[in-house]
Amino acid sequence: MSKQQFTTLLEEKGISLSSFQLEQFERYYQLLVEWNNKMNLTAITDEDEVYLKHFYDSISAAFYYDHMNEPLKVVDVGAGAGFPSIPLKICFPQLNVSIVDSLKKRIGFLEHLAAELELTNCSFYHDRAETFAQNKKHRESYDLVIARAVARMPVLTELCLPLAKVDGDLLAMKGADATEELKEATRAIGLLGGEVIGDNQFKLPIEESERHIILIHKNEKTPKKYPRKPGTPNKQPLL
C-alpha cells in the first residue's frame, strides 16, 4: 500500500489526514525501522507493508466504532510497537491513550515515539495485563479497551474486560479464526460482565486477508477475582 493509496482509502472511510498527520506516519515508519535494528519490534519493515499491515490495519478499528471522534479514555493492552493505538491517536488526536506492555524495552520505544511525534495525553505502563487490571487506579476506568493480536478470545476477555468501565467497550482486532474464538469465549464474556455487540468481518485491501473487529459491551462489573494471577488465564482459560 503506497502512501497515496493509504491516504485515499482512509478518505473513502471519512478520515482525512492533514499534512502534519502524514508527516507523523512517515516519522513513525522511520523510527520503527531504526529501533527495529536494535530490538525486535516487528517482522514487517517494508514501507508499503507497514502502511498496510500496521497503519491501515490499526486504523480499521475506527471503521466499526462510532465514538473515535470523542475524547475517550482508551487503553491498549499489549500494544507492542504501538499498534493499534498510536495510529488511531494520530488520526484522532483527542483520544486519551494509555498503553500497557510487559516488555520495558518496548515501553522505552513508545515513550520516545510519542515525544518525536509530539503526541499529548499518552501514558505508558510497564506491567503485566493481569496485575495492571487489578490496580485500583486502572480497573474499570476506561471507556474503550482495545487489543490487536494479543491472545485468543477467552484469554483476551479476561485480560481486557476488567479494565472497561460499566457501559464501556472492548474492541478486539482478530484474524480469520475470530468466529471460532468467539464461540470459545462465550462463557468468559458473560462471566466478566460483557455482551457481544458485533463481529464485523472485512478484507484488508490489496492482500485480501480476512479481518474481524469484535465489539463487546460491558454491562456489569467484573467479579473482583478476575483477571487471575499472571500466567493463569493462558494456562487455564475460562472455557
Image (cartoon, rainbow, N blue to C red):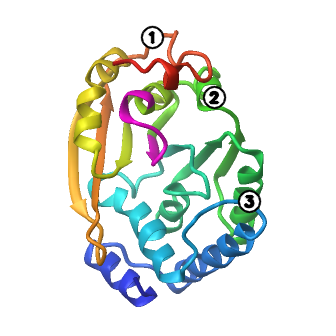
Which amino acid, by three-letter code, is at mark 3? Phe
Which amino acid, by three-letter code, is at mark 2? Phe
**Above-or-below relation of 150 to 108:** above
Name which residue lies at 74% across and 68% down: 35
Q: Is residue 84 something that shows in the picture?
A: yes
Structural crowding at the residue carrying mark 1, measured as other residues with C-alpha within 10 Å and reported as few (<14), some (14–19) or many (≥20): few
Q: Is residue 168 something that shows in the picture?
A: no
Magenta span: 145-155
Tally the marks. 3
Which residue is nearer to you in this view: 47 or 164?
A: 47
Quadrant placement of the C terminus? top left
Which amino acid, by three-letter code, is at mark 1? Pro
**Image check: 48 left or right of 61?**
right
Secondary element at tag 3? helix
Tell me how far mark 2 sits from mark 3, CA to CA: 20 Å
Q: Quadrant of residue 220?
A: top left
Secondary element at tag 1? loop
Magenta highlight on residue 83: no
Secondary element at tag 2? helix
**Image check: 101 left or right of 87?**
right
Structural crowding at the residue carrying mark 2, measured as other residues with C-alpha within 10 Å and reported as few (<14), some (14–19) or many (≥20): many
**Image check: 188 left or right of 147?**
left
**Image check: 209 left or right of 165?**
left
Q: Are marks 2 and 1 in contact (CB under 8 Å)?
A: no
Residue 39 horizontal/vertical position (percent) = 74, 61
Q: Which mark is residue 223?
A: 1
Which residue is nearer to you in this view: 194 or 32?
A: 32
Q: Earlier in the sequence, mark 2 or mark 3?
A: 3
Q: Which residue is mark 2?
A: 132
Q: Which residue is mark 3?
A: 109
